[in-house]
Amino acid sequence: MGLIGVAYFLRYDIKILVIWIVCTSYINWLLISIMTGRKIGYSLWMQCNDLFLNILFSIIAGYVSYRIGLLIANEIVTALIGALLFAVIYFLLHFIFKTKQFKTVLSSNK
């Protein structure tokens, strides 16, 4: 499904191609989560609860990085600043809201 979409949407704008890839990735994650969740007793609802803040923080950090990237003309500088800005915003949001995922990462480094 992903390869067919890439071949089809390649002739259009790159944004449409990226949207297609993101959508197929979420559909793929959804199907795999349902199938493996049944086998290991980890329901889709529990998985969504565990991933919700990660996805939300990723969307927020990605949006801010994208908007800042529009102000920079050089593509290499845009990529470097965007990646750095994304990481800082993402981890800062986890630190501010003190999520259990972030606490797990911090405790594993000790």
Image: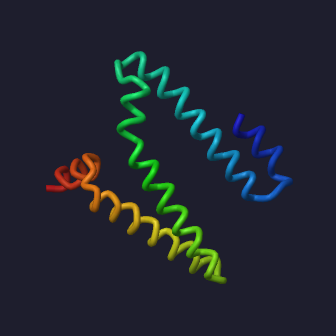
At 55% from the left and 63% from the top, the residue drawn is: 63
- Residue 82 lies left or right of residue 54; in this view the side is right
> Of all residues shown, which one is farthest toward the top?
39
- Residue 64 lies left or right of residue 72; in this view the side is left
> Of all residues shown, which one is farthest toward the bottom?
73
Q: Quadrant of the C terminus?
A: bottom left
Residue 30 point in image, percent of width and height: 53, 31
Residue 76 point in image, percent of width and height: 60, 77
- Residue 94 lies left or right of residue 54; in this view the side is left
Figure coloring: rainbow
The quadrant holding residue 78 is bottom right
Q: Is residue 106 above or below residue 47?
A: below
At 52% from the left and 68% from the top, the residue drawn is: 64
Q: Is residue 94 above or below residue 83?
A: above
Q: Is residue 70 above or below residue 47?
A: below
> Of all residues shown, which one is farthest toward the front?
97
Residue 5 point in image, percent of width and height: 76, 41
- Residue 72 lies left or right of residue 100; in this view the side is right
Residue 56 point in image, percent of width and height: 45, 51
Give the total of numbered labels.
0
At 24% from the left and 55% from the top, the residue drawn is: 98
Q: Quadrant of the N terminus?
A: top right
At 60% from the left and 34% from the top, the residue drawn is: 27
> Of all residues shown, which one is farthest toward the right?
11
